[in-house]
């Protein structure tokens, strides 16, 4: 009888140990996930812009993501958010950016290679607002408010340090809702290839925001005609983004490499 009791006691201890083991593993996994959330130094940004970032999900969430994908008309785009490598793909051509070098691959001249560098990350930059305005080398200053149809939107002006990007003379103005701090408009200048500043602003209205994995991202971008330096009427159809996703899983950057039939456009 004593032998039976001893065996039962040993079995109970073994079962107890097995039941406790997963608790340790779970705690370790939770700790690992928590450590993946980056710490953000908000001291570099003006207070109003911080509120805009937080209204759209926060820079902690943005900086923890590794990839962004979306479909715009017939074109699909994949971007590595950590290094900004990018791939645009259609049935007729592919354009890629890999470690700062831009390439294009196509069987015929569907897309002018001379426009590839300017175009390769253009829509990504517009789409990933306001988060891309947290990049290094940016200066912030107050801007005059924008009034459109009896609504007034405060503004924040963005300029760039010399040598930042392909067009450091570009300027942007982000306009936001003063109550919700959601982004509503973007004004921007185009100086690519001109080597001089411009005061001619174009305007985009950001519409139909959609939450994707904790980030508030736009569904529609509507360009506007400009009258007396302000947006007037919608210009053409809105750009509608579909199959939107952001993810924090590591990426295989081999997809961004130039294929054999590709050529560099730098």
Image (spheres, grey):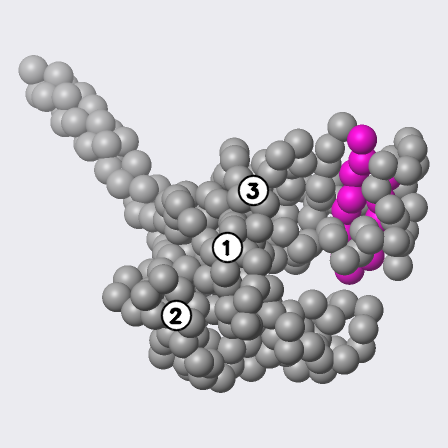
Residue, x 69% and y 77% (percent of image)?
Answer: 198
Dot 3 corresponds to which residue? 237
Dot 2 corresponds to which residue? 147
Q: Is residue 142 above or below residue 149?
A: below
Residue 218 screen position, x and y as percent: 46, 48
Residue 98 visible in rendering: no
Dot 1 corresponds to which residue? 233
The range drawn in magenta is 92-105
Query: Could you say which is closer to the camera, residue 9 or residue 134?
Result: 134
Q: Is residue 217 above or below residue 37?
A: above
Residue, x 56% and y 64% (percent of image)?
Answer: 226
Query: Could you say which is closer to the camera, residue 15 or residue 143?
Result: 143
Q: Are marks 2 and 1 in contact (CB under 8 Å)?
A: no
Residue 159 screen position, x and y as percent: 60, 78
Local SS, label 2 = strand
Q: CA distance from mark 2 to mark 1?
A: 14 Å
Residue 205 screen position, x and y as percent: 47, 56
Q: CA distance from mark 3 to mark 1?
A: 11 Å
User: Is residue 225 in the magenta section?
Assistant: no
Q: Are marks 3 and 2 in contact (CB under 8 Å)?
A: no
| Marks 2 and 1, the one that precedes in the sequence | 2
Locate the C terminus and report the quarter of the image it occupies.
bottom right
Determine the image quadrant of residue 25. Answer: top left
Please indicate whether residue 111 sits to the left or right of residue 210 in the image.
right
Residue, x 42% and y 49% (percent of image)?
Answer: 207
Q: Is residue 241 above or below residue 155?
A: above
User: Is residue 98 in the magenta section?
Assistant: yes
Please indicate whether residue 57 sits to the left or right of residue 168 in the image.
left
């Amino acid at each position: 009888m004593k032998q039976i009791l001893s065996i039962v006691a040993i079995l109970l201890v073994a079962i107890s140990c097995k039941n406790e083991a997963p608790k340790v593993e779970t705690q370790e996994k939770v700790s690992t996930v928590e450590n993946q959330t980056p710490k953000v130094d908000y001291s570099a940004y003006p207070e109003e812009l911080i509120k805009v970032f937080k209204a759209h999900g926060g820079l902690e969430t943005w900086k923890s993501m590794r990839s962004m994908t979306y479909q715009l008309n017939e074109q699909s785009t994949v971007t590595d958010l950590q290094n900004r490598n990018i791939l645009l793909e259609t049935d007729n051509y592919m354009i890629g950016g890999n470690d700062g070098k831009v390439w294009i691959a196509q069987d015929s001249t569907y897309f002018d290679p001379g426009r590839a560098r300017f175009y390769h990350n253009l829509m990504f930059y517009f789409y990933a607002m306001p988060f891309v305005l947290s990049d290094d080398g940016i200066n912030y200053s107050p801007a005059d408010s924008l009034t459109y149809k009896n609504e007034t939107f405060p503004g924040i002006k963005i300029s760039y340090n010399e040598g930042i990007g392909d067009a450091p003379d570009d300027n942007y103005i982000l306009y936001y809702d003063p109550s919700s701090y959601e982004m509503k408009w973007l004004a921007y200048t185009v100086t690519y290839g001109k080597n001089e500043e411009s005061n001619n602003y174009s305007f985009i209205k950001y519409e139909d925001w959609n939450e994707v994995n904790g980030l508030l991202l736009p569904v529609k971008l509507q360009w506007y005609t400009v009258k007396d330096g302000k947006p007037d009427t919608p210009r053409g159809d809105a750009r509608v983004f579909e199959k939107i996703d952001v993810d924090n899983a590591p990426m295989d950057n081999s997809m961004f490499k130039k294929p054999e039939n590709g050529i560099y456009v730098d």
